[in-house]
Amino acid sequence: MDMLTGNIKKIYFHYLFAGLGSAIIISIYITVDTVVAGQYEGPVAAAALSVISPLWSLFISIGLLFGIGGAILTSVLRSEGDEARANEFFTVSLFAGIIISIVITALLFLFREEFLRLCGADEEVLPYALSYVKWLVYAIPFFLVGTALSAFVRNDGAPFLAMLAVISGGALNIFGDIFFVFTCDMGIEGAGLATMLGQLVAFAILSTHFLSKRCKLRLIKPESITHKLAQIVSMGFSPFIVDISFGFLIFCFNNQIMRYSNSTYLAVFGTIANVTVLLQSLFYGIGQALQPIVSSNFGAKNFGRIRAILRYSFATALIMGVIFFALVFSFPDIILRMYMHITDEILMVGPAIIRTYSFAYLLMGLNIVASYYLQALKQSNSALLISLLRGFAVSLALIFLLPATAGFKAIWLTMPLTELLTFFIALALLRKNPTSTLL
């Protein structure tokens, strides 16, 4: 499909379905692990995987930093006819991801227990978290570099190969969870092993793109590496903040929950955090679908096509947000039973927490789409502001202020209030943009 002249609606839905497919399967790596381990081990496994969640955010966010950042620059340069410089950015992005993944793997090997305690693990939860991380460390290079590579493969005209990779890895992860956790009686350790194998398969399938005749990605010797890396980081910093901030929020939630209450509430939060990872991943899918189309047309100055993509993306995010809110608000008991072998104590406190948190889904997608859209237009500062408000400035202030001033239960209002305040600012930033006249 020609992104500059083809039917814009067909192109959008072509990339949207691939983006949503990839996003939902990525979230399976966390969701299915929690469901299976929670059914086998009980609430303590859900609490352990809540402790581990910041690690997933770290891997994904760094992959997006180099993947989205490099892919946007590559798309713009290609639309301008500069293939050589485009491949220089690809080369720098890929090797930066490889180096960072090696460093993180080494640090987690050496300091895994210290990190898990920092994320809220107590003496009861720590052994379960360590059992899972035992295998997770081997998945880091495949997951981090694979996330970056997926963005380039998608922008290189192969969105369905990117989707096939994560579907295959996700399918192996699902069956592996069931086999290792239950059949082999490995418990939560089996979930970690299944995740590692799923990541390996996904990465291997992504790598086959380099054997395709349609592949335009080339590893070449780049010039001005430091300067190019700075450009990549600047361009990818907004999506990086979007994801790393969620991991940091989980870290802060975990510690605040254990400060004011106990592991029962941590298990409930582990459930809602996993639901949020799943739904937020779908919103990322919308952003990742619009990014290559907007970037390419921005380089070619096709502003009418850009505005059309914004309309489609906002409509998609709004519809999905309403559906997600309605489902989560209406069926909290079912969600809890899906994620763990439920206890009376969990059932007593869980539904109210989930219903309160679910209001965040109404505006979450619109804020994420606004950030991706502005980033694709190379308006890094505006995109970064939205991401910082959602992930740090507003949310962190509320995490600490609400329980201290209004009682512990008020902490569950953190994300609904954060998304509401961020939405008004995102709307103002979009209205200032000349390509966003529909708003």
Image: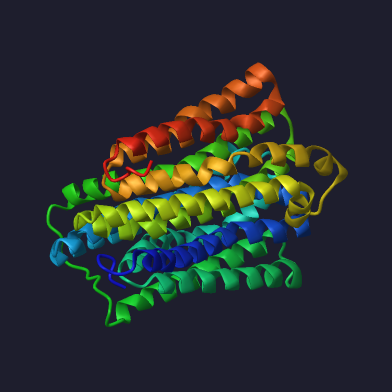
Is residue 100 visible in the rendered image? The answer is no
Residue located at (27% from left, 82% from top): 213
Quadrant occupied by the C terminus: top left
In screen coordinates, is 349 left or right of 72? Answer: right
Q: Is residue 358 above or below residue 181?
A: above
Q: Nearer the viewer, residue 260 or 274?
A: 274
Residue furthest to the top in view is 405
The reply, left or right, for residue 145 in relation to residue 281 is left
Whole-percent x and y of residue 131?
64, 56
| Residue drawn where x is 35% and y is 39% of the image | 430
Quarter of the image holding residue 105? bottom left
Percent x, y of residue 261 = 73, 30
Residue 36, above or below 347:
below
Quarter holding residue 80 = bottom left
Query: With 78 as the anchor, is 259 left or right in this view?
Result: right
Residue 54: x and y, percent? 53, 45
Q: Is residue 1 left or right of residue 317?
A: left
The colour style of the image is rainbow
Q: How many marks?
A: 0
Residue displayed at 27% across by 79% down = 214
**Residue 165 visible (yes or no):** yes
Residue at 67% from the left image edge and 26% from the top image edge: 410
Nearer to the camera, 77 or 249 = 77
Residue occupying the far front of the picture: 438
Where is the N terminus found, in terms of image quarters?
bottom left
Residue 307 x, y percent position in the rendering = 33, 51
Residue in the foreground of this view, choosing between 195 and 418: 418
